[in-house]
Image (tube, rainbow, N blue to C red):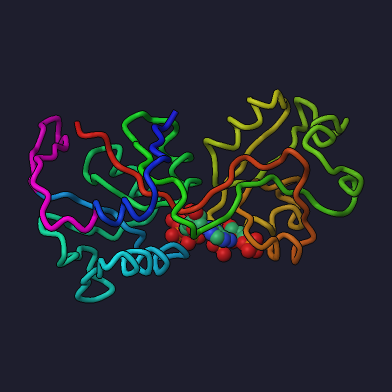
Amino acid sequence: MLTMMSQIRLPLYCCYASSTSISETHHQVFNGNTVSRQEIRRGLPSKGRMSSDTLDLLKDCQLSVKQVNPRQYVAQIPQISNLEVWFQRPKDIVRKLLSGDLDLGIVGLDVLTEFGQGNEDLIVVHEALEYGDCRLSIAIPQYGIFENVNSLEELAKMPQWTEDKPLRVATGFTYLGPKFMKDNGIKHVAFSTADGALEAAPAMGIADAILDLVSSGTTLKENNLKEIESGTVLESQAALVASRDQ
Ligand SMILES: Nc1ncnc2c1ncn2[C@@H]1O[C@H](COP(=O)(O)OP(=O)(O)OP(=O)(O)O)[C@@H](O)[C@H]1O
Ligand SMILES: O=P(O)(O)OC[C@H]1O[C@H](OP(=O)(O)OP(=O)(O)O)[C@H](O)[C@@H]1O
């Protein structure tokens, strides 16, 4: 299980982050050797949906990130000495927290759970930063053999799925998808993966179902897909995560 410190509320986090200097030694492993550094490294999403909301949150905390230009991936927060900001893709923030190359990061709980895989070296300092809300859900077509299927149980009980012809699920969540099916005792499932626009997979005949992020539900609706009862794997929003000092 990831360690949670949910009792820490946002204003406290802002106060902590506003301290003017941080001077502990941090360690990372490089080529088998432990390397020490004095700076605290914070990873922020370099692009995508979370990026501007993350900068807005820091600005609300009176912490303005000084980035010379958008293609430069390192920045400073002038109010805090010894702090480096590194812009990275969310999944890479989690990987670098695990390796100790970052000390703090802001990512969605979905990415944290998928790539952190329950590692205890990841400490959730604040799990509800109140943006980036979405859920990871199974969705199936509204039509055809799925017309009267409205729950995970009904989906699992469909006679169509056999060892030779399993339920085909397209997802980018290749750790959480199989885990969820296994935890729910659902057999005869085969996963395929793609990087985006997964909602097209059932209509293209590539998959029977998808497991993807849903927020407003518009993308599912526009592609004639529906969520099902007990088909939500997790609820997500932006979280502040720390790497356990190694
Ligand atoms: N529809 C959505 N509504 C709200 N938040 C979302 C939505 N889709 C994704 N998110 C959140 O934003 C995060 C980043 O999503 P985004 O699609 O921008 O990723 P990305 O930076 O393009 O990542 P990738 O490396 O997969 O390309 C997700 O991990 C999730 O926490
Ligand atoms: O419920 P909604 O508000 O419609 O949002 C859901 C969509 O948002 C995300 O995709 P994104 O826009 O990041 O594009 P992608 O499919 O190319 O990753 C997600 O993967 C869904 O496709």
Residue 21 among magenta residues: yes
Q: Is residue 199 rendered to the left or right of residue 47?
A: right
Give the quarter of the figure containing the C terminus.
top left
Q: Residue at x 81, y 32 (%)?
A: 153
Measured as percent of width and height from the top left, residue 44 is found at: 32, 58
User: Which residue is more in the foreground, 227 or 31?
Assistant: 227
Q: Residue 78: x percent and y percent?
A: 15, 67
Q: Is residue 129 above or below residue 181?
A: below
Residue lying furthest bottom in this view? 69
Residue 145: quadrant of the picture: top right
Question: Where in the figure is residue 29, as x and y percent of width and height?
Answer: 16, 35
Residue 12 placement, left or right of 166:
left
Report the side of 201 relative to 171 (left or right): right
Compared with residue 70, is residue 44 higher up or lower down, i.e. above or below? above
What is the magenta range? 17-38
Q: Position of residue 186 (x, y in %)?
A: 72, 27
Query: Hey, which quadrant is residue 61 in on the image?
Result: bottom left
